[in-house]
Image (cartoon, rainbow, N blue to C red):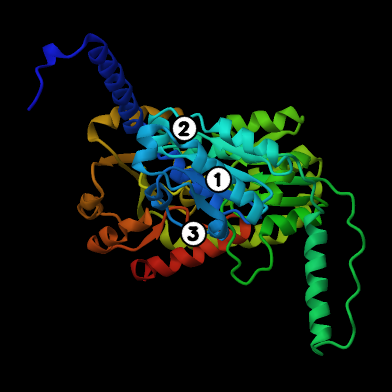
């Protein structure tokens, strides 16, 4: 039976009104932003699971919260949960299960770090579990422990979640690591020694000389590298020839040790610096430059990417010499593709993904547009969201200097009709929308499928030519 609102206690009515106002504000913010919202627990847990290294993740909550995200990555072996019950939540007896769990992990796993992530019910009851984490950490001073009040109740953006996670990783006690090129040389020597032991080669390989003293930089938010027959990402080879070491491309191929070494690098070059204010403050404490670079997809962006690194490291001339041949191939492939497909109508989807990938979040998902425009496409942006927010998105695009046509669509299942009615010939959409592109009978490639740097330009024109060959024949 519904209670008469006039009989409710005034304090309850005031608090409910305040709470409702908060959630309405959150909903308005979400509807007017290009990025999708996220649950900070699932986001940070998913991100940590992808990192190679000997550390542990503890979900402080019920078992179901430990199953609310994709369990993919090398850290699955060190994922734990306190498994709190309803009775423990109701009575507030949540400290002892966490204490037992942390002590067991320290004794049995002996990790180099532990991240404790709080679930929604823990936040609802106001559990100050960071006190328990600090208590256990004092008994195990060699193991850094980080308590994070993550939950689905903390409505926020994917970028804010990543910035928070990156800040915590970079704040761990620093751990210098050998030069990446020397580690690769040692790996090749180890493989050679194995070949020698198996009789595949007659002479044992010599150990590499001690590493040279060269500047080491970190890259943050670049697209992941796909080998495609190449031993190393283009930027690693180019910068190596220019006398610069690359620690890692964070977060895609960065290990736990790499994160602990990021504060020892000469500089960090980041795609869309505005996304990571907390991480920037951590790095600035050690006077490490935090330098903006474009997402290096397409000719113009890749030129600017290498130019920014060259200027900051005083190695611009060396980098120009190192890229000369591969840049010429990229320029030729653009001209060939444009001569065949210029003017093809392309639909570019926005606000369709929630996967916590830094390169997809950079520049609010618009990082590939310059590369596609260079190839001669006639681009229209398709924004998933309420049609009544069209004016707000128009203002957002104007502030970002984006001059493309755009349209809104409310739900993904009407996208097939939008594509067909718009006369599009190819689409760049979230992968789950492939069936909608098939309904419209046009080829599709997933968002952020384009490869990075000059080598990537050649790969991209091959991919797009294959998709569009019927249209161009």
Pick the front one: 240 or 198: 198
Residue at 37 percent across and 27 percent down: it is 395
Label 2, label 1: how far apart the Cα atoms are: 54 Å
Q: Residues within 10 Å of mark 1 (few under 14, many from 20)?
A: few
- Reading the image, the residue beneath label 1 is 100
Give the label, 1 or 3, closer to the camera. Answer: 1
- Reading the image, the residue beneath label 2 is 401
- 19 vs 268, left or right, is left
- Specify whether residue 111 is in view: yes
Report x, y in % for residue 382. 32, 44
Q: Secondary structure at mark 1?
A: helix
- 321 vs 384, left or right, is right
The quadrant in which the C terminus is found is bottom left
Q: Are marks 2 and 1 in contact (CB under 8 Å)?
A: no
- 340 vs 58, left or right, is left
Q: Is residue 283 above or below residue 224?
A: above
Give the label, 3 or 2, closer to the camera. Answer: 3
Q: Earlier in the sequence, mark 1 or mark 3?
A: 3
Pick the front one: 283 or 338: 283
Report x, y in % for residue 107. 65, 52
- Reading the image, the residue beneath label 3 is 72
């Amino acid at each position: 039976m519904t209670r008469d609102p006039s009989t409710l206690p005034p304090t309850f009515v005031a608090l409910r009104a305040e709470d409702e106002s908060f959630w309405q504000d959150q909903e308005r913010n979400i509807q007017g932003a290009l990025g999708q919202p996220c649950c900070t627990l699932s986001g940070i847990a998913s991100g940590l699971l992808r990192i190679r290294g000997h550390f542990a993740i503890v979900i402080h909550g019920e078992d179901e919260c430990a199953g609310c995200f994709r369990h993919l990555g090398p850290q699955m072996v060190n994922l734990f949960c306190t498994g709190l019950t309803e009775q423990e939540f109701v009575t507030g007896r949540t400290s002892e299960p966490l204490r037992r769990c942390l002590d067991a992990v320290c004794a049995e796993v002996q990790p180099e770090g532990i991240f404790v992530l709080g679930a929604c019910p823990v936040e609802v009851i106001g559990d100050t579990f960071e006190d328990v984490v600090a208590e256990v950490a004092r008994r195990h001073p060699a193991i850094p422990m980080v308590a994070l009040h993550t939950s689905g109740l903390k409505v926020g953006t994917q970028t804010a979640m990543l910035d928070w996670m990156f800040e915590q990783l970079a704040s761990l006690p620093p751990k210098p690591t050998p030069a990446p090129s020397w580690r690769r040389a040692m790996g090749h020597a180890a493989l050679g020694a194995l070949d020698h032991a198996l009789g595949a080669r007659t002479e044992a390989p010599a150990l590499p000389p001690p590493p040279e003293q060269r500047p080491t930089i970190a890259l943050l938010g670049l697209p992941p590298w796909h080998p495609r027959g190449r031993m190393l990402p283009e930027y690693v080879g180019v910068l190596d020839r220019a006398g610069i070491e690359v620690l890692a491309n964070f977060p895609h191929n960065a290990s736990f040790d790499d994160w602990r070494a990021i504060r020892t690098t000469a500089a960090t070059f980041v795609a869309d610096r505005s996304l990571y204010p907390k991480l920037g403050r951590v790095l600035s404490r050690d006077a490490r430059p935090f330098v903006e670079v474009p997402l290096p997809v397409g000719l113009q962006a890749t030129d600017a990417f290498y130019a920014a690194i060259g200027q900051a490291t005083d190695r611009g001339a060396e980098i120009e010499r190192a890229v000369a041949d591969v840049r010429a191939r990229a320029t030729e492939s653009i001209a060939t593709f444009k001569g065949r497909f210029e003017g093809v109508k392309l639909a570019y989807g926005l606000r369709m993904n929630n996967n916590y990938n830094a390169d997809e979040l950079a520049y609010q998902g618009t990082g590939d547009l310059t590369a596609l425009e260079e190839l001669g496409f006639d681009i229209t942006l398709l924004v998933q969201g309420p049609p009544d927010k069209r004016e707000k998105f128009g203002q957002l695009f104007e502030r970002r200097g984006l001059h493309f046509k755009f349209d809104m669509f409310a739900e993904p299942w009407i996208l097939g009709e939008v594509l067909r009615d718009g006369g599009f010939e190819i689409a760049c959409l979230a992968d789950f929308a492939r069936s909608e592109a098939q309904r419209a009978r046009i080829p599709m490639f997933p968002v952020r499928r384009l490869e990075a740097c000059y080598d990537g330009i050649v790969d991209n024109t091959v991919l797009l030519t294959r998709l569009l060959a019927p249209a161009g024949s």
